[in-house]
């Protein structure tokens, strides 16, 4: 029973780390370098930091930078979020009916 609890705790921690990286880790790595020119991308954005503030800043309607790949050991590495800040906010706080607005 103790082993099962340890395994479940480990999986939970791994899932939390993966979610944190997917949500806004813009550092990239050697296989996913961030763009040198951000003019086609929105700035990094975390909708959790803005629960009542719909994003209207410059480039809030542009997609964010993202990159993913599968490592040799099978783990999928994800950086960034390709949704625009406006779409991220709507997905988190919009409370819609599940359809695109």
Image (cartoon, rainbow, N blue to C red):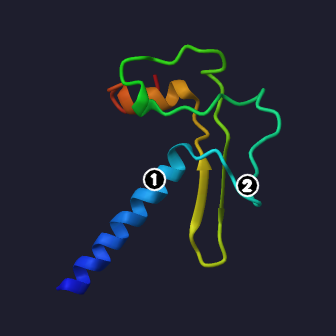
Label at residue 32: 2
Dot 1 crowding, Cα within 10 Å, few <14, some 14–19, many 20+: few
Q: Is residue 11 left or right of residue 31?
A: left
Residue drawn at x 45%, y 58% as measured from the top left: 17
Query: How much space separates mark 1 and mark 2, taking CA atoms?
Result: 17 Å
Query: Is disc 2 placed on a helix, strand or loop?
Result: loop
Answer with the quarter of the image where residue 65 lies. top right
Label at residue 82: none
Q: Earlier in the sequence, mark 1 or mark 2?
A: 1
Number of callouts: 2
| Mark 1 vs 2: CB contact within 8 A | no
Q: Residue furthest right?
A: 36
Query: Is disc 1 placed on a helix, strand or loop?
Result: helix
Q: Is residue 72 left or right of residue 87?
A: right
- Residue 99 seen by the camera: no
Residue drawn at x 60%, y 61% as measured from the top left: 77
Of the pair 43 and 98, the residue shown nearer to us: 43
Where is residue 98 drawn, in percent x and y? 37, 33
Dot 2 crowding, Cα within 10 Å, few <14, some 14–19, many 20+: some
In the image, residue 20 sits, relative to residue 52, either above or below, namely below
Residue drawn at x 39%, y 33% as measured from the top left: 92
Answer with the quarter of the image where residue 54 lies. top left
* Residue bearing mark 1: 19
Where is residue 32 drawn, in percent x and y? 73, 54
Residue drawn at x 34%, y 65% as measured from the top left: 12
- Residue 51 seen by the camera: yes
Where is residue 94 drawn, in percent x and y? 37, 24
Where is residue 61 drawn, in percent x and y? 61, 21
Q: Is residue 94 left or right of residue 22?
A: left
Q: Quadrant of the N terminus?
A: bottom left
């Amino acid at each position: 029973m103790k082993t099962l609890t340890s395994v479940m705790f480990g999986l939970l921690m791994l899932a939390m780390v993966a979610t944190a990286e997917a949500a806004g880790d813009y550092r990239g790595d050697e296989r996913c370098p961030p763009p040198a020119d951000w003019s086609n991308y929105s700035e990094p954005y975390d909708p959790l930091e803005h629960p009542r503030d719909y994003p209207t800043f410059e480039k809030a309607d542009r997609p964010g930078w993202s990159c993913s790949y599968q490592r040799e050991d099978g783990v999928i590495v994800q950086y960034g979020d390709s949704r625009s800040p406006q779409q991220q906010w709507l997905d988190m706080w919009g409370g819609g009916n599940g359809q695109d607005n």
